[in-house]
Amino acid sequence: MRKVKLLLLGMEQINLDKILTIYGRNPILEALLDKTLKIYKLHLSTSNRDTPQLDKIVKLAKKRDIEIAYHSKKSLSYISKNSKQDQGVALDIIMKDFLTEEEFIKKYSSYRLLALDGISNPQNLGMIIRSATAGNIDAIILPTKKSAQISPLVIKSSVGTIFKLPIIKTSSLLTTLKRFKKNNTYIYTLSSYAKNSYIDEVYSNRTIFILGNETIGVSKEIEKISDKSISIPMRRGVESLNVAVTASLLAFIC
């Protein structure tokens, strides 16, 4: 059985897997101004110099009764995991829509998902999330390894929509997809070489589209367990589309 690490927020227990830590003063200020977001803790470096922006961050945190923790610059870098860009601040956001595949399957009887296999560009990840949120996608499966992770750049590229869409985080995309297949889910991989057009398919009420790495596409181990490979037809000699554009087309399939 998977061990669940818990934090305490007042009398409430918070699953550590549902904590998203962001960094950078602008993203944190925007997050604190968004009253729909539930915040766990604000982290500050003791080496910070007073600035109007930092003062505003502290005032907003106190106004919302958010715990403020002070750290050495080195300790803060362990929290932010980006000492070069954290600007001496980090913020823990409670993401109620960070789910495991077990939690998602219990909650949804029908669904259409995007699974990301090695998407490395943070801007692509942000734009994929934005299109998925706007369209007919119920969640994104995001590996925690060998993939772009949620960062200020991803949040900016998603235009804040990341806080509105369920994210299924997984340490093994292959294992997660196998679990969904046991739940009668049909899995498609996108390939420019596939003979079947995405337009001609009749999709089931449990469908996953797999989008591969920007350079090498879908990995072989993931391709092996997919049920079908589909393509987006191209004209005038164009070989392929940017992965974020492909996600946009899939998000609005009826």
Image (cartoon, helix red, strand yellow):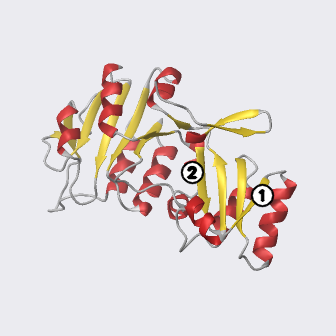
Q: Nearer the viewer, residue 97 or 61?
A: 61
Which residue is at 14% across, 62% downward? Answer: 237
The answer to whether residue 202 is seen in the rendering is: yes
Which residue is at 48% across, 35% downward? Answer: 138
Q: Position of residue 57 (x, y in %)?
A: 77, 65
Q: Position of residue 66 (x, y in %)?
A: 79, 52
From the viewer's perspective, is residue 182 above or below residue 158? Answer: above
| 1 vs 2, front mark | 1
Q: Residues within 10 Å of mark 1 (few under 14, many from 20)?
A: some
Q: Which residue is mark 1?
A: 68
Disc 1 to disc 2: CB gap under 8 Å: no
| Drawn side of residue 171 relative to residue 174, left or right | right
Q: Nearer the viewer, residue 186 or 17?
A: 17
- Indicate the quadrant where residue 56 lies: bottom right
Label 2: state its secondary structure.
Answer: helix
- Indicate the quadrant where residue 195 lies: top left
Which residue is at 37% across, 25% downward? Answer: 206
Badge 1 amino acid: Ile
Q: Position of residue 24 (x, y in %)?
A: 62, 68
Q: Earlier in the sequence, mark 1 or mark 2?
A: 1
Badge 2 amino acid: Thr
Q: CA distance from mark 1 to mark 2?
A: 26 Å
